[in-house]
Amino acid sequence: MLLKHTTPKEIDRKSLTINPAKTCQPIGAMYAAFGLNGCLPHSHGSQGCCAYHRSTLTRHFKEPIVASTSSFSEGSSVFGGSANLVQAIDTIFNVYDPLIVAVHTTCLSETIGDDLTQIISKAAEEGKIPEGKMVIHCNTPSYVGSHVTGYSNQVVAFVKFFSTSTMKKRNAVNLVAGWMEPSDMREIKRMAKEMEARTIMFPDMTGVLDTGLTGKYTMYPHGGTTLSDMKATGDSRFTIGLGEYCTTDACIKLENKCKVKFEVVDIPIGLKATDRFVMSLSRHANVPVPDSITEERSKLLDLIADNQKYFYGKRVALFGDPDTLVPLTEFLISLDMKPVYIVTGTPGKGFDERMATLLKDIPEAKYMSGAGADIFRLHQWIKQEGVDMLIGNTYGKYISLDENIPFIRFGFPIADRAGHNYFPKTGYVGATNLTIQILNALMDYQDRTCPEEKVEFQM
Ligand code: SF4
């Protein structure tokens, strides 16, 4: 009983979060920075922050996460980190030779009030930034928002520093990827290729955080959005943002800067969200939906129809990021399941509004976002009335063990299982993977817990 002290009775609390359903802003900025080819993320703050962010990403991706830090001391905490950052930029280019350095702030440098624009200009004036190399930056104070906000801020910085309009439109559609796995991005790019749509995805972590073992270490793997593609996003005919929280600001920035119109759709998780993505891409890239994609959809439908009786009425609790929770909730409803408890630590009205619409036919459903929407509260709701399944990151494991609930690992971080790097959850293929995972968890639970005389060979 790892969480035995959790009680069903909720107490009104405003200044206390227990087991937050989010993590800190710079982790998102660091993750997004890996989506640019040849980019080294740089954490402007103390070594401890950078070590925490790196280790969290390493545990999830099982890959070496390389990032540099301004390495604040007591002196820089009092007098500011300008000298540290200028020195760091010099050392980074001399020793590690990236194409781009993406600097993000931490709580400490934000509290001091370090002006990154001014410090990086100083480094440039002093000749610390070699010809053809770039240092970009974004602000990620972790006492507001979450890792999702940090991710969004980094993607906005990509547009701000790189997207360029030459006034000659190209027949390409930008795909701004929200927070998802590299395997999910790979699947979305495969679908776009199948549709013969010309796309530029950014950020793009494929070929960076899902590389194979070759026996040769490469500090900057071949993947990621190239600098020339990133610049060309300003000439694309349209932009599709995948996930409201992670991509809307970047889409708006690109429209304001380069006059590229945009539409934000959900991350294509599940049947309906994938339908919307496919139709959006078909419309804006002016390409038809090929039979091969329709066939993938029909296989998913067949799987759902064949096994509907196992899903029907099952109560589900879930936690994670708003951009994934919204389409996931919608998909669970498509499966005839009942998402009854949903929390995200990331604040924002969009999540509450979408949930109100999606859950209108499930009167017992409860949802919450922001600081008070923590995993402890989700556990309290489960204690009040149980669920048949829990979906979330590794932090949900303790609830699942204590309450003996089938558990699907989904989101970030997943530190105790493999597979998320390999099997996508996006597109019709990803929805098929997810459906099978849910089905197997329910059936395993039934086999494990039913009386001996009720064990069935055929399920
Ligand atoms: S001090 Fe701020 S930036 Fe650093 S690890 Fe803590 S929350 Fe994150």
Image (tube, rainbow, N blue to C red):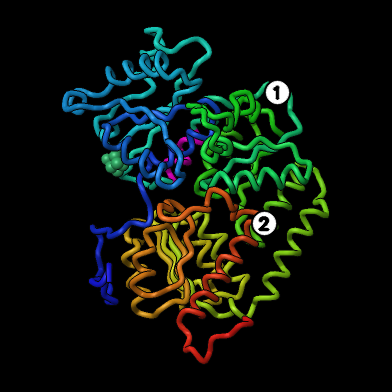
Q: Main secondary structure of the magenta part?
A: helix
Q: Residue 336 is drawn in which quadrant?
A: bottom right
Q: In this picture, which residue range is highlighted in magenta?
A: 148-156
218 is within the stretch colored magenta: no
Residue under numbered circle 2: 429
Image quadrant containing the C terminus:
bottom right
Q: Residues within 10 Å of mark 1 (few under 14, many from 20)?
A: few
Q: Looking at the image, in which quadrant does ligand 1 appear? A: top left
Question: In terms of secondary structure, where does tag 2 sit?
Answer: helix
Residue 244 seen from this side:
yes
Residue 266 seen from this side:
no
Residue at the image point whose x is 54% and y is 41% from the top: 210
Q: Position of residue 396 (x, y in %)?
A: 38, 63
Question: In terms of secondary structure, where does tag 1 sit?
Answer: loop
Image quadrant containing the N terminus:
bottom left
154 is within the stretch colored magenta: yes
